[in-house]
Each structure stands twice: as C-alpha cells, then as structure tokens.
C-alpha cells in the first residue's frame, strides 16, 4: 500500500518507510513525461525509530514534536 500524506505525525505513526522525493525531473528522451527521483528511502523499523527519538541523528523526526 502506498500512501501520500502531508501530516508528518500521521506518516510516522502509520508508515514503515519514508520516501523523500527530489524536485521534478524532466526526461529529454520523453518530453511529455515527467516525475521526481527518490533521493532517500529510509526504513522506519523499531530500531530506526528509537535512534531517531534519541536525537542521535539529524532528521525530520524532530519536526513531529
């Protein structure tokens, strides 16, 4: 299941992975198609959530507080 949200608390509570997209990318080989590139794919398992909660990593988790 793929879900898009703008609510960080909802995303961290319901999600198991955090995908961060880069700016819109235009492909010169397909000028009528456009999209974005995934720049970060961060698993949100219990070990990672504990690491983020302790502040031992620079992250967006602090925005949730």
Image (cartoon, rainbow, N blue to C red):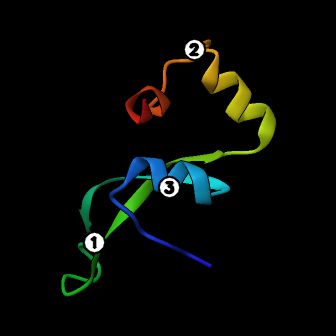
Residue 49 lies, in percent from the top left, at 68, 34
Looking at the rendered structure, the secondary structure element under dot 1 is loop
Residue 64 lies, in percent from the top left, at 43, 36
Which residue is found at the position 19% from the left and 82% from the top?
Answer: 31
Which residue is found at the position 62% from the left and 24% from the top?
Answer: 53
Image quarter where the C terminus lies is: top left
C-alpha separation, residue under disc 2 versus residue under disc 1: 38 Å
Looking at the rendered structure, the secondary structure element under dot 3 is helix
Residue that badge 1 annotates: 27
Count the labels in the image: 3
Which residue is found at the position 79% from the left and 39% from the top?
Answer: 46
Looking at the rendered structure, the secondary structure element under dot 2 is loop
Residue 25 lies, in percent from the top left, at 27, 63
Residue that badge 2 annotates: 55
C-alpha separation, residue under disc 2 versus residue under disc 3: 19 Å
Disc nearer the start of the sequence (2/1): 1
Disc 1 to disc 3: CB gap under 8 Å:
no
Would residue 41 appear left or right of 16 to someone viewing this image? left
Residue 23 lies, in percent from the top left, at 25, 54
Residue sitting farthest toward the left: 31
Q: Is residue 37 visible?
A: yes
Near-viewer residue (29 or 36): 36
C-alpha separation, residue under disc 1 versus residue under disc 3: 30 Å
Residue 11 disc label: 3
- Nearer the observer: mark 2 or 1; the answer is 2
- Is residue 33 positioned above or below 7 on the image? below
Disc nearer the start of the sequence (1/3): 3
- Nearer the observer: mark 1 or 3; the answer is 3
């Amino acid at each position: 299941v793929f879900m898009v949200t703008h609510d960080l608390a909802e995303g961290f509570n319901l999600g198991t992975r955090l995908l961060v997209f880069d700016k819109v990318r235009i492909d010169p080989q397909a000028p009528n198609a456009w999209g974005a590139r995934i720049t970060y794919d961060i698993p949100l398992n219990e070990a990672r959530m504990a690491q983020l909660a302790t502040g031992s990593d620079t992250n967006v988790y602090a925005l949730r507080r």
